[in-house]
Image (cartoon, rainbow, N blue to C red):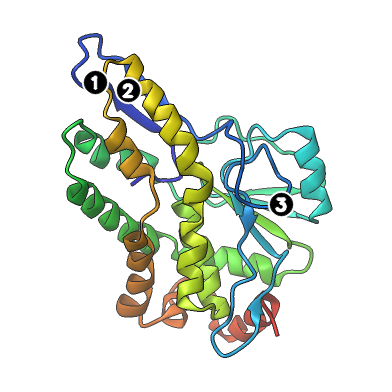
Protein backbone atom coordinates (compact mmCIF):
# COMPACT_ATOMS: atom_id res chain seq x y z
CA UNK A 1 0.00 0.00 0.00
CA UNK A 2 1.14 3.57 0.13
CA UNK A 3 -0.30 3.76 3.50
CA UNK A 4 -0.56 7.42 4.36
CA UNK A 5 3.05 6.73 4.88
CA UNK A 6 6.72 7.16 4.54
CA UNK A 7 8.15 4.91 1.84
CA UNK A 8 11.49 3.41 2.76
CA UNK A 9 13.04 2.08 -0.44
CA UNK A 10 16.38 0.85 -1.65
CA UNK A 11 17.83 2.29 -4.81
CA UNK A 12 17.92 -0.89 -6.88
CA UNK A 13 20.79 -1.27 -9.30
CA UNK A 14 23.02 1.19 -7.49
CA UNK A 15 26.14 -0.29 -5.96
CA UNK A 16 26.02 2.32 -3.23
CA UNK A 17 22.72 0.79 -1.96
CA UNK A 18 21.45 4.27 -1.21
CA UNK A 19 18.46 4.38 1.11
CA UNK A 20 15.77 6.68 -0.19
CA UNK A 21 13.12 8.12 2.09
CA UNK A 22 10.15 9.69 0.37
CA UNK A 23 8.31 11.70 2.96
CA UNK A 24 4.91 13.31 2.59
CA UNK A 25 5.57 16.20 4.97
CA UNK A 26 6.49 19.73 3.97
CA UNK A 27 4.37 19.79 0.83
CA UNK A 28 2.13 22.67 -0.12
CA UNK A 29 -1.55 21.86 -0.04
CA UNK A 30 -3.06 22.84 -3.38
CA UNK A 31 -6.50 21.25 -3.50
CA UNK A 32 -8.62 21.99 -0.46
CA UNK A 33 -9.78 25.57 -0.96
CA UNK A 34 -9.59 25.86 2.84
CA UNK A 35 -6.77 28.36 3.05
CA UNK A 36 -4.62 25.73 4.80
CA UNK A 37 -1.21 25.78 3.08
CA UNK A 38 1.18 23.87 5.35
CA UNK A 39 -0.84 20.66 5.82
CA UNK A 40 -1.00 18.35 2.83
CA UNK A 41 -4.31 17.00 1.59
CA UNK A 42 -6.47 19.06 3.95
CA UNK A 43 -10.15 19.14 3.08
CA UNK A 44 -13.67 18.78 4.41
CA UNK A 45 -14.99 15.21 4.47
CA UNK A 46 -18.52 16.59 4.34
CA UNK A 47 -20.61 18.23 1.66
CA UNK A 48 -21.43 14.91 0.00
CA UNK A 49 -24.96 14.26 -1.28
CA UNK A 50 -26.96 11.81 0.79
CA UNK A 51 -28.90 9.05 -0.94
CA UNK A 52 -32.55 9.98 -0.48
CA UNK A 53 -31.88 13.67 0.17
CA UNK A 54 -29.76 16.02 2.23
CA UNK A 55 -26.00 16.44 2.42
CA UNK A 56 -23.31 15.31 4.83
CA UNK A 57 -22.72 18.22 7.15
CA UNK A 58 -19.77 20.46 6.24
CA UNK A 59 -17.45 21.89 8.84
CA UNK A 60 -17.79 18.83 11.09
CA UNK A 61 -15.19 16.28 9.90
CA UNK A 62 -11.95 17.36 8.25
CA UNK A 63 -9.21 15.11 6.89
CA UNK A 64 -5.56 15.63 6.07
CA UNK A 65 -2.00 14.38 6.08
CA UNK A 66 0.02 14.80 9.26
CA UNK A 67 0.12 18.34 10.68
CA UNK A 68 3.60 17.96 12.20
CA UNK A 69 5.00 20.97 10.35
CA UNK A 70 1.95 23.20 10.40
CA UNK A 71 2.82 26.89 10.53
CA UNK A 72 1.44 29.56 12.84
CA UNK A 73 -0.94 30.97 10.26
CA UNK A 74 -2.54 27.59 9.70
CA UNK A 75 -2.83 26.89 13.43
CA UNK A 76 -4.86 30.10 13.56
CA UNK A 77 -6.92 28.89 10.60
CA UNK A 78 -7.63 25.57 12.36
CA UNK A 79 -8.91 27.56 15.32
CA UNK A 80 -11.08 29.65 12.98
CA UNK A 81 -12.57 26.42 11.63
CA UNK A 82 -13.45 25.56 15.21
CA UNK A 83 -11.50 22.29 15.29
CA UNK A 84 -11.63 20.86 18.80
CA UNK A 85 -10.10 17.40 18.34
CA UNK A 86 -7.34 15.91 16.19
CA UNK A 87 -7.35 12.14 15.68
CA UNK A 88 -3.97 10.70 14.71
CA UNK A 89 -4.16 7.24 13.09
CA UNK A 90 -0.40 6.67 12.98
CA UNK A 91 1.41 3.94 14.85
CA UNK A 92 4.16 4.54 17.43
CA UNK A 93 6.98 4.28 14.90
CA UNK A 94 5.53 6.99 12.65
CA UNK A 95 4.63 9.68 15.12
CA UNK A 96 7.95 10.75 16.63
CA UNK A 97 7.26 14.32 15.51
CA UNK A 98 3.71 14.40 16.86
CA UNK A 99 3.00 17.49 18.89
CA UNK A 100 0.07 19.29 20.45
CA UNK A 101 -0.59 22.23 18.16
CA UNK A 102 -2.37 24.26 20.80
CA UNK A 103 -3.91 23.61 24.24
CA UNK A 104 -7.28 24.47 22.68
CA UNK A 105 -7.26 21.34 20.47
CA UNK A 106 -7.30 17.81 21.95
CA UNK A 107 -4.95 15.28 20.39
CA UNK A 108 -6.08 11.63 20.42
CA UNK A 109 -4.16 8.67 18.98
CA UNK A 110 -6.16 5.74 17.56
CA UNK A 111 -3.31 3.81 15.91
CA UNK A 112 -3.80 1.76 12.77
CA UNK A 113 -0.20 0.62 12.57
CA UNK A 114 0.25 -0.64 9.00
CA UNK A 115 3.43 1.13 7.91
CA UNK A 116 5.72 -1.82 8.63
CA UNK A 117 3.64 -4.47 6.87
CA UNK A 118 3.14 -2.13 3.94
CA UNK A 119 6.88 -1.68 3.43
CA UNK A 120 7.47 -5.42 3.86
CA UNK A 121 4.97 -6.38 1.17
CA UNK A 122 5.51 -3.55 -1.30
CA UNK A 123 9.25 -3.06 -1.20
CA UNK A 124 10.11 -6.15 -3.32
CA UNK A 125 7.71 -4.92 -6.02
CA UNK A 126 9.15 -1.40 -6.34
CA UNK A 127 11.55 -1.99 -9.23
CA UNK A 128 12.21 -0.34 -12.57
CA UNK A 129 10.49 -3.22 -14.37
CA UNK A 130 7.54 -3.27 -12.03
CA UNK A 131 4.28 -5.12 -12.49
CA UNK A 132 1.41 -2.67 -11.83
CA UNK A 133 -1.12 -5.47 -11.48
CA UNK A 134 0.94 -7.11 -8.75
CA UNK A 135 1.28 -3.81 -6.86
CA UNK A 136 -2.46 -3.30 -7.19
CA UNK A 137 -3.14 -6.80 -5.84
CA UNK A 138 -0.96 -6.24 -2.77
CA UNK A 139 -2.59 -2.86 -2.10
CA UNK A 140 -6.06 -4.39 -2.44
CA UNK A 141 -5.21 -7.16 0.04
CA UNK A 142 -3.82 -4.61 2.50
CA UNK A 143 -6.96 -2.49 2.16
CA UNK A 144 -9.08 -5.49 3.16
CA UNK A 145 -6.89 -5.93 6.25
CA UNK A 146 -7.17 -2.21 7.01
CA UNK A 147 -10.96 -2.21 6.75
CA UNK A 148 -11.18 -5.15 9.15
CA UNK A 149 -8.73 -3.54 11.59
CA UNK A 150 -10.53 -0.19 11.49
CA UNK A 151 -13.75 -1.38 13.18
CA UNK A 152 -12.80 -0.53 16.79
CA UNK A 153 -11.28 2.75 15.64
CA UNK A 154 -14.52 3.72 13.90
CA UNK A 155 -16.46 2.78 17.04
CA UNK A 156 -14.30 5.08 19.20
CA UNK A 157 -14.56 7.84 16.62
CA UNK A 158 -18.36 7.52 16.48
CA UNK A 159 -18.63 7.73 20.26
CA UNK A 160 -16.34 10.77 20.22
CA UNK A 161 -18.60 12.53 17.69
CA UNK A 162 -21.66 11.78 19.84
CA UNK A 163 -20.09 13.31 22.93
CA UNK A 164 -20.57 17.09 23.25
CA UNK A 165 -17.55 19.31 22.71
CA UNK A 166 -15.44 17.09 20.44
CA UNK A 167 -16.38 18.33 16.97
CA UNK A 168 -15.37 19.72 14.56
CA UNK A 169 -12.54 17.22 14.36
CA UNK A 170 -9.60 16.53 12.07
CA UNK A 171 -8.61 12.97 11.11
CA UNK A 172 -5.11 12.32 9.79
CA UNK A 173 -2.48 9.64 9.29
CA UNK A 174 0.84 10.23 7.53
CA UNK A 175 -0.21 11.31 4.02
CA UNK A 176 -3.95 11.46 4.66
CA UNK A 177 -4.72 8.97 1.89
CA UNK A 178 -5.21 5.40 2.99
CA UNK A 179 -6.11 5.07 6.66
CA UNK A 180 -7.63 8.55 6.68
CA UNK A 181 -9.36 7.86 3.36
CA UNK A 182 -10.85 4.62 4.68
CA UNK A 183 -12.09 6.13 7.97
CA UNK A 184 -13.54 9.11 6.11
CA UNK A 185 -15.34 6.76 3.71
CA UNK A 186 -16.74 4.75 6.63
CA UNK A 187 -18.12 7.90 8.26
CA UNK A 188 -19.58 8.92 4.90
CA UNK A 189 -21.23 5.50 4.64
CA UNK A 190 -22.74 5.97 8.10
CA UNK A 191 -24.16 9.29 6.93
CA UNK A 192 -25.66 7.54 3.90
CA UNK A 193 -23.60 9.44 1.32
CA UNK A 194 -24.01 8.58 -2.34
CA UNK A 195 -21.53 5.93 -3.49
CA UNK A 196 -20.08 8.06 -6.28
CA UNK A 197 -19.66 10.99 -3.89
CA UNK A 198 -17.63 8.80 -1.51
CA UNK A 199 -15.46 7.64 -4.39
CA UNK A 200 -14.91 11.21 -5.55
CA UNK A 201 -13.90 12.44 -2.10
CA UNK A 202 -11.41 9.58 -1.77
CA UNK A 203 -9.88 10.14 -5.21
CA UNK A 204 -9.40 13.88 -4.56
CA UNK A 205 -6.15 13.08 -2.72
CA UNK A 206 -4.50 12.72 -6.14
CA UNK A 207 -5.15 16.41 -6.89
CA UNK A 208 -2.91 17.47 -4.01
CA UNK A 209 -0.33 14.73 -4.13
CA UNK A 210 0.42 13.56 -7.67
CA UNK A 211 1.65 16.79 -9.35
CA UNK A 212 4.22 17.40 -6.62
CA UNK A 213 5.56 13.86 -6.63
CA UNK A 214 5.69 13.59 -10.40
CA UNK A 215 8.17 16.46 -10.32
CA UNK A 216 10.08 15.18 -7.30
CA UNK A 217 10.41 11.65 -8.68
CA UNK A 218 11.46 12.93 -12.10
CA UNK A 219 14.35 14.74 -10.43
CA UNK A 220 15.25 11.66 -8.40
CA UNK A 221 15.29 9.53 -11.54
CA UNK A 222 17.51 12.05 -13.33
CA UNK A 223 19.97 12.29 -10.43
CA UNK A 224 20.33 8.50 -10.32
CA UNK A 225 20.81 8.14 -14.09
CA UNK A 226 17.47 6.42 -14.44
CA UNK A 227 18.16 3.78 -11.78
CA UNK A 228 15.56 4.92 -9.25
CA UNK A 229 12.19 3.16 -9.86
CA UNK A 230 10.21 6.40 -10.00
CA UNK A 231 7.38 5.03 -12.11
CA UNK A 232 6.78 2.17 -9.69
CA UNK A 233 6.81 4.52 -6.68
CA UNK A 234 4.35 6.92 -8.32
CA UNK A 235 2.06 4.03 -9.26
CA UNK A 236 2.04 2.88 -5.64
CA UNK A 237 1.46 6.41 -4.33
CA UNK A 238 -1.54 7.20 -6.53
CA UNK A 239 -5.03 6.67 -5.23
CA UNK A 240 -6.88 4.24 -7.47
CA UNK A 241 -10.56 3.76 -8.14
CA UNK A 242 -10.17 0.06 -7.32
CA UNK A 243 -8.87 0.87 -3.81
CA UNK A 244 -12.00 2.61 -2.62
CA UNK A 245 -14.16 -0.01 -4.35
CA UNK A 246 -12.34 -2.59 -2.23
CA UNK A 247 -13.38 -0.67 0.91
CA UNK A 248 -17.00 -0.34 -0.14
CA UNK A 249 -17.25 -3.95 -1.30
CA UNK A 250 -15.68 -5.30 1.90
CA UNK A 251 -18.20 -3.45 4.06
CA UNK A 252 -21.17 -4.31 1.85
CA UNK A 253 -20.39 -7.92 0.97
CA UNK A 254 -18.53 -9.23 4.02
CA UNK A 255 -20.35 -7.32 6.75
CA UNK A 256 -23.71 -6.83 5.05
CA UNK A 257 -23.43 -3.04 5.05
CA UNK A 258 -22.28 -0.31 7.38
CA UNK A 259 -24.73 -1.26 10.15
CA UNK A 260 -23.37 -4.80 10.21
CA UNK A 261 -19.83 -3.44 10.19
CA UNK A 262 -20.62 -1.22 13.19
CA UNK A 263 -22.54 -3.90 15.08
CA UNK A 264 -19.44 -5.91 15.94
CA UNK A 265 -17.17 -2.93 16.47
CA UNK A 266 -18.07 -2.10 20.06
CA UNK A 267 -20.42 0.71 19.04
CA UNK A 268 -23.93 0.77 20.51
CA UNK A 269 -25.98 0.40 17.35
CA UNK A 270 -28.97 1.94 19.14
CA UNK A 271 -27.12 5.26 18.87
CA UNK A 272 -26.79 5.06 15.08
CA UNK A 273 -29.70 7.34 14.25
CA UNK A 274 -28.41 9.99 16.66
CA UNK A 275 -25.03 9.77 14.98
CA UNK A 276 -26.60 10.19 11.56
CA UNK A 277 -28.51 13.25 12.75
CA UNK A 278 -25.20 14.85 13.69
CA UNK A 279 -23.52 13.89 10.40
CA UNK A 280 -26.36 14.87 8.05
CA UNK A 281 -27.65 18.32 7.23
CA UNK A 282 -31.21 17.85 5.96
**Label 3 vs label 1: CA separation?**
38 Å
| Marks 1 and 2 close (CB-CB < 8 Å) | yes
Instruction: For mark 3, give the secondary structure.
Output: loop
Which residue is at the far top? 16
Q: Residues within 10 Å of mark 3 (few under 14, many from 20)?
A: some
Numbered label tally = 3
Percent x, y for residue 243? 35, 59
Q: Look at mark 2 in the image and give the residue it sits on.
A: 221
Percent x, y for residue 113? 42, 46
Percent x, y for residue 2? 37, 44
Q: Residue at (31%, 43%) from the top-left corner?
A: 235
Q: Nearer the viewer, mark 3 or mark 2?
A: 2
Instruction: For mark 2, give the secondary structure.
Output: helix
Q: Residues within 10 Å of mark 2 (few under 14, many from 20)?
A: some
Q: Is residue 111 visible?
A: no
Q: Look at mark 3 in the image and give the residue it sits on.
A: 34
| Marks 3 and 2 close (CB-CB < 8 Å) | no
Eyeballing the image, is 86 above or below 247?
Answer: above
**Label 1 vs label 2: CA separation?**
6 Å
Q: Residue at (38%, 43%) from the top-left corner?
A: 237
Going from N to C along the chain, the mark reached first, 3 or 1, is: 3
Residue 274 picture quarter: bottom right
Percent x, y for residue 198? 49, 69
Going from N to C along the chain, the mark reached first, 1 or 2, is: 2
Closest to the observer, 98 or 182: 182
**Which mark is drawn over residue 227?**
1
Left or right: 3 in relation to 92 = left
Amino acid sequence: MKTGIVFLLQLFGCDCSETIIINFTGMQNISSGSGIRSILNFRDAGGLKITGGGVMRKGLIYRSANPDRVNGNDISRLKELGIKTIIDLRGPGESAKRRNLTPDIKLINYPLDFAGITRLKLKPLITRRYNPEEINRVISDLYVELVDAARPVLSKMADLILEPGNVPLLIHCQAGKDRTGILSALLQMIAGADRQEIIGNYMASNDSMVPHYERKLRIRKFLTLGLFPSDAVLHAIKQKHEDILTVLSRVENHYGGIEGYLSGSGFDIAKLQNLRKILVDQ
